Image (cartoon, helix red, strand yellow):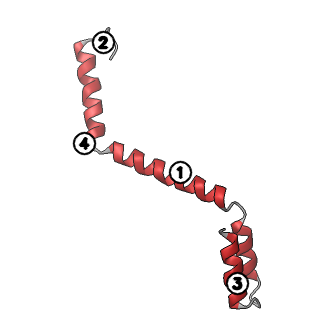
Amino acid sequence: MPVHIGEADLSYILEHERTHIRRRDYLIKALAFLALSLALIIFMIAPNSSDEITFLWRDSSLDPRKHLEVMTQAYL
């Protein structure tokens, strides 16, 4: 904490931080970070997989075994 903060300001700051703790904002922040990290990892692993999936949905004449093979390849 900066040295020049007065007692009144310090009590407001501490109450503000206590509010974060009571609302468990630290958990929400951790979960949001985890969700974003997971989304980025998925995007890096399979950036073009949505194109293959869209193609499969449009091509209804595709053999189900071939469908599974292409879907598997899209996520590898």
Give SS at disc 3: helix
Near-viewer residue (69 or 54):
69
Query: Can you identify the residue that label 3 sits on?
Result: 67
- The answer to whether 18 is drawn above or below residue 71 in the figure is above
Classify 10 Å Cα crowding around label 1: few (below 14), some (14-19), many (20 and above). Answer: few
Give SS at disc 2: loop
Horizontally, residue 57 falls left or right of residue 19, namely: right
Write the residue at 68% across / 90% down.
64
Q: CA distance from mark 2 to mark 1?
A: 37 Å
Three-letter code, disc 1: Ser
Near-viewer residue (1 or 69):
69
Horizontally, residue 18 falls left or right of residue 47, namely: left
Q: Quadrant of the N terminus?
A: top left
Three-letter code, disc 2: Ile
Q: Residue furthest front?
A: 76
Query: Can you identify the residue that label 1 sits on?
Result: 37
Marks 3 and 2: CB-CB under 8 Å? no
Give the x, y percent position of residue 63: 73, 91
- Pair 3/2: label in front: 3
Q: CA distance from mark 2 to mark 4?
A: 24 Å
